[in-house]
Image (cartoon, rainbow, N blue to C red):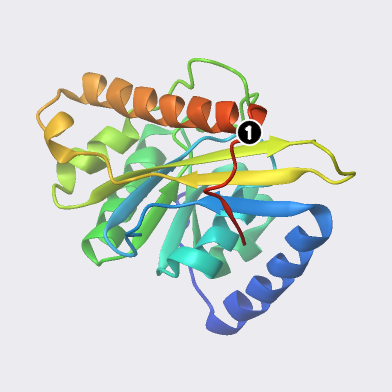
Amino acid sequence: MFQPARKTPWIDWGFTRFNRLFLNYHFNDIRIQTPESIPDEKTLFLINHSTWWDPLVIFYINDRLVQSDGYGMMHEEGIRRFPFFRRIGAYSVSGEDRRHLMESLKYSKRLLEQGKTVWIFPQGNEQPLEKRPLEFFSGISYLTQKCRDIKIVPVSLYYALEHTRKPNAYIRLGEALPKQEYVSLPRKEMTRYFEKKVTEQLDELREDIIQENLHSFKKL
């Protein structure tokens, strides 16, 4: 059964402070590269998904940088195990149940229409960081076709063990994708377009890390 978010301000406040301490304890550095203008409403963020850390890093980005009224899909099983996450903006999705999936997408549409931001892992489940292609589900194109005035922003997450005991987390927050490039595409082609753009950005981020070309990144 679909479970919507049930944001609770005092829980959100407490988790924000816990998450800052938790990530700063486990990572050597969290570094981010951003465009000049960062959208904070009516935006669908598309993020690659490879680790357990990803939702916590996304929450941290929104807390420290985007500062939007953000919401995110979470697998139904995860919501059942950790219902607490509904209190900070998570809502359930299940790719195995079409009715559940449609309820989740329609809920996402309402959030976007209300000016919220929605953060989605279009791969669905965690996949190895180096796996290609990323293989996105088509729900993101459904939302794009139903909400014509939203922005679509790719977000790349990459983790690296370098010169320190703890890993570094790197984030690239991309420019909003040019609407004229995808708005008229059929749903399947639109999904492939998003998949290609997110893959390209992730591969560029990986190359910058390998080459230690990090001058444009700032520490969070």
Instruction: State the residue in front, 45 or 197.
Output: 197
Few, some or many residues within 10 Å of mark 1 (<14, 14–19, 20+): some
> In percent of the image, x 38 and y 25: which residue is there?
195
Q: As displayed, is residue 219 above or below residue 135?
A: below
Instruction: State the residue in front, 94 or 42.
Output: 42
Inspect this view and state whether residue 113 appears: yes
Inspect this view and state whether residue 4 appears: no
Q: Decide if residue 70 is on the left or right side of residue 28.
A: left
Residue 182 position by quadrant: top left
| Residue identified by numbered label 1 | 209
Residue 67 position by quadrant: bottom left
Question: Residue 180's x, y, as percent?
Answer: 11, 35
Q: Decide if residue 173 is on the left or right side of residue 57.
A: left
Most extreme residue toward the right is 165
**Which kind of residue does numbered mark 1 sit on?**
Ile
Name the quadrant of the C terminus: bottom right
Question: Residue 41's x, y, as percent?
Answer: 30, 64
Q: As displayed, is residue 97 above or below residue 164?
A: above
> In percent of the image, x 13 and y 47: which residue is there?
148
Secondary structure under the numbered disc 1 in the rendered image: helix
Residue 136 position by quadrant: top left
Instruction: State the residue in front, 59 or 188.
Output: 59
